[in-house]
Image (spheres, helix red, strand yellow):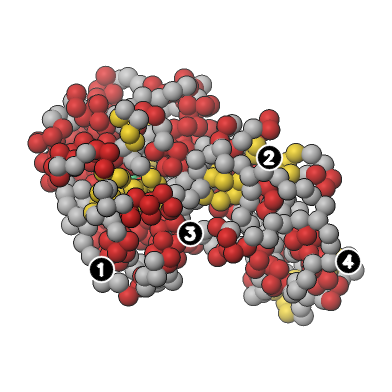
Amino acid sequence: QQFVTVEGRAIPIEGERNLLEIIRKAGIELPTFCYHSELSVYGACRLCLVEVAGRGVQGACSTPPEPGLDIKVNTPQLREIRKIAVELLLANHDLSCPSCFKSVDCKLMDVARRVGVTSVRFKPVQEKAPLDFSSPSIIRDPNKCVLCGDCVRMCSEIQGIGAIGFAHRGHQTAVLPAFGKGLGEGECVGCGQCANVCPTGALVPRSEMDEVLTALADPTKTVVAQVAPAVRVGLGECFASPAGDPVMGRMVAALKRLGFDAVYDTTFAADLTVIEEGQEFLTRAAAGEKLPQFTSCCPGWVQFAEQSFPELLPNLSSCRSPQQMFGSLVKEMLPEKQGIARKDLIVVSIMPCTAKKFEARRPEFAVDGSPDVDFVLTTQELARMIDGAGLRFNSLEPESLDMPFGFGTGAGVIFGASGGVTEAVLRFAAEKITGKPLASVDFAEVRGDSGLREATLEVGGKTLRLAIVHGLANARAVAEQVVAGNSEYDLIEVMACPGGCIGGAGQPVPKDLADRKRRTKDLYQCDKTFPLHKAQDNMFVTECYDKFLGDVGGHKAHSLLHTHYQS
Ligand code: HC1
Ligand code: SF4
């Protein structure tokens, strides 16, 4: 066994990639802005410096562990270097901390406290720059950027986009969208993953809380909520709920206390999506046309495909996402049912995702300028509204979702994890192909963490080749294969965010990979505890077809539940 000595204690080397990981294993959390285990090492923030005997001061993140190294992490010299580094950042930082969206989990604030900054010895050298409000999903505040490059690497390495990058030199260095445009005017798809890794408030999800609070206070409006699958496994983290704690009932109670007239489940619409998308897949497979079929429920992926792979747009399922199916259906059905005007019905989505804010504003998802989904709140925004209203979330008595749009099956709920859409569609398509009920609803072959997974299944004498992708860099690789004619897949699921919607940028920022795994596990647990597991068994969805929509994939279903793409 080989060892590194950390503050006098021998720590075994067990495959760690750098000294930072060894030091963490020794139980010491060094301050750092720019180190993320899923991104490349950049070494910009100079906070994780350590003293290596015989070598002097080195960056822990960029030094590989070598046997025999003797490391000190907390000498007076190191403390002073870290303090100066943080003070230099603070000198140019917009210190509007109490009103900053990041104030609850700002790494700069945390690090400043940890390194013992009590005053700033330096004067600012940068002029104030204007904020960038051009994206419906993300607000960019250059005055809070600490140049750690986390967002740049996230966008290029995981999302394969490169919508933001370093510009200028010296003290004018800045992180900017390409060609001097606003974030919303270039290649950015609004996935928000950059904001997820941003240690400060330089990139934050765009809030719609004020608009929602105004609607809730307006007595002429009926305000209804739809809650996305993944929110139920993220919201509890904001209130220190234990893993596996079913927060849905308390979330419904909180939304009712906030003034929502009804609380529904996007899972209902996900069931509808399974049926429409599953039928579409079977039709294409029978005709041998427009295969592979790509899923289309992730708005980040849809925008990415429109921008980068216009030749693949015919391959995208024409189904709207569950969020948008819900909006168009409910805005069509509820006003008549409740005797109210469409303009007085406000649909608010609670989503784990920032790109859903952009999706809701797409002009094709509106009737005469009136949107199907009026506002989109992220999981984090909902937590803030609950907090702001003074509600003690953990003490709320659970309440039930409203019917009929509050009823979903396990098929719809697993949409929130990577592989879930594929599995849900398989639960539908396999029964259609074989004409028999499934012996087991679990398709473990399509589950997993890897960003690019493949599965081949034999169903009723047919071979189905599937690919499941998360992260748009992985999506690009698969899309290129398809364009080049080198793909044999029949169905490809794409989710922009790592892990699928459970890892969306509207969720509480995950501390590590274990958080994402826990959310996925909890979501599959929801499936287990739901009474039904197949979308086609959702009796409220069946009733909706019988009484309102007509045939699956029929004329009315097409006009309300399907869409077209723009290149
Ligand atoms: Fe998702 Fe979806 S699963 S896209 O991840 O298809 O956001 O949760 O709501 O629309 O249902 C997100 C989640 C969500 C849609 C569904
Ligand atoms: Fe890149 Fe997504 Fe951030 Fe846009 S929102 S800059 S696409 S990481």
Identify the residue position indicated by label 2 in the image.
176
Where's residue 518, x and y in %? 42, 62
Viewer-proximal residue among 17 and 57: 57
Label located before the other in sequence (1 or 3) = 1
| Nearer the camera: disc 2 or disc 3 | 2
* Residue 21 in view: no
* Mark 4 Cα shell of 10 Å, populated few (<14), some (14-19), many (≥20): few
Alpha-carbon span between mark 4 and mark 3: 38 Å
Residue, x 64% and y 60% (percent of image)? 96
Marks 1 and 3, Cα distance to the nearest angstrom? 22 Å
In front: label 1 or label 4: 1
Comparing labels 4 and 3, the label whose residue is closer to the camera: 3
Q: Which residue is mark 1?
A: 398
Disc 2 residue type (three-letter) = Leu
Pointer 4 residue: 56
Residue bearing the label numbered 3: 508
Q: Can you say which quadrant of the picture contains the N terminus?
A: bottom right
Quarter of the image where one finds residue 302: top left
Q: Which of marks 1 and 2 precedes in the sequence?
A: 2
Is residue 249 visible to us here?
Answer: yes
Give residue 42's mark: none
Judged from the image, the secondary structure of the residue bearing numbered disc 3 is loop
Ligand 1: which quarter? top left
Residue 83 is situated, as x and y percent measured from the top left of the image, at 79, 68
In the image: residue 314, left or right of residue 398: right
- Measure the alpha-carbon separation of dots 4 and 2: 35 Å
